[in-house]
Amino acid sequence: MTAPAYKRIMLKLSGEALMGDDSYGINRATIERIVAEVAEVVRMGVQVGVVIGGGNIFRGVAPGAVGMDRATADYMGMLATVMNALALQDAMRCIGLQSRVQTALAIEAVAEPYIRGKAIRYLEEGKVVIFGAGTGNPFFTTDTAAALRGMEVGAEIVLKATKVDGVYTDDPKTNPDAMRYQQLSFDEAIMRNLKVMDATALALCRDQKMPLAVFSIFKAGALKRVVMGEDEGTKVYC
Ligand SMILES: Nc1ncnc2c1ncn2[C@@H]1O[C@H](COP(=O)(O)OP(=O)(O)O)[C@@H](O)[C@H]1O
Ligand SMILES: O=c1ccn([C@@H]2O[C@H](COP(=O)(O)OP(=O)(O)O)[C@@H](O)[C@H]2O)c(=O)[nH]1
């Protein structure tokens, strides 16, 4: 069997994608399927960190947050990611996949705090580390948290599992003529304002030379194919 292309990855799981076909919250079948795919790459010997989003529960820039103080709304969004982290950990426990949740906001009774050295140790032990509460700061996103934590723990690539199957020339949800890139550079993604990931996250990856792969969370086997270095989604390079 060919070896995986990466030893350590940072996987960003979209909060919104956890809804599956529901209109909000966490869809059980969706989370179970995602966890099974993560387990498959862990069994291949890949060390996996996961940054989970929160858009299925709360987004600081959502209509429901209109009129709210932005920082307050963002803290609510970060707390939402902690709920998703716990749900994800529980789904992993159900299939015997060992994981730890670390959170950027102190909620001692619920999860341990983010401690870089400890996170690296867990990864070395083959445990999945789920990073909750994003960066711990308002005005950021969990995409930026994935880039940041990926760099901190020495991941070789950030994998963004999202609703679309790659980076397009324009938003494919609104422009049916948009074409998918097989690969493109960070400079091009930033210059063309391709909003598949926020500019802060893209700039951080570019500056630290952290490659990024964007692929569909709904496509069965896509995670494994990216990890094997196969042609899947879009690769953004430095
Ligand atoms: N150029 C583009 N290529 C791909 N997707 C894009 C592009 N521009 C905007 N999008 C939109 O970005 C969304 C993914 O980003 P985001 O909202 O951050 O999702 P996530 O929930 O994964 O964090 C897609 O659903 C897509 O509609
Ligand atoms: O470092 C962070 C990460 C997240 N958030 C808040 O948490 C929400 C949920 O995260 P995100 O939108 O990135 O989740 P996803 O797009 O994956 O559903 C964001 O809208 C922000 O309000 C934040 O303030 N700082």
Image: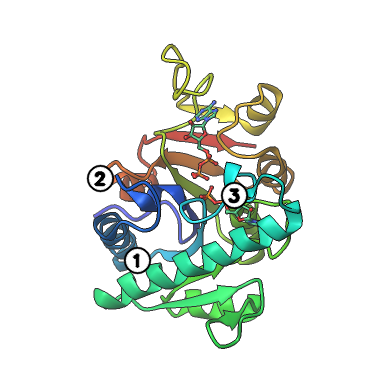
User: Could you say which quadrant of the image residue 137 lies in?
Assistant: bottom right
Crowd band around label 2 with a 10 angstrom C-alpha radius: few (<14), some (14–19), many (20+): few
Mark nearer the viewer, 2 or 1: 2
Crowd band around label 1 with a 10 angstrom C-alpha radius: few (<14), some (14–19), many (20+): many
| In the image, farthest residue toward the bottom | 109
Q: Position of residue 123 (x, y in %)?
A: 49, 74
Callout 2: helix, strand or loop? loop
Mark 1 belongs to which amino acid?
Answer: Val
Q: Earlier in the sequence, mark 3 or mark 2?
A: 3
Give the residue drawn at x 71%, y 52%. Answer: 68
**Label for residue 220?**
2
Q: Position of residue 142 (x, y in %)?
A: 59, 54
Mark 3 belongs to which amino acid?
Answer: Asp
Q: Which residue is mark 1?
A: 42
Q: Which residue is mark 3?
A: 143
Left or right: residue 223 compared with residue 6: left
Task: Give how far apart the Cα atoms at labels 2 and 1 are.
Answer: 16 Å
| In the image, farthest residue toward the top | 177
Q: Position of residue 91 (x, y in %)?
A: 31, 70
Give the residue drawn at x 32%, y 72%. Answer: 92
Disc 1, disc 3: CB below 8 Å? no
Q: Position of residue 16 (x, y in %)?
A: 44, 48
Callout 1: helix, strand or loop? helix
Callout 3: helix, strand or loop? helix
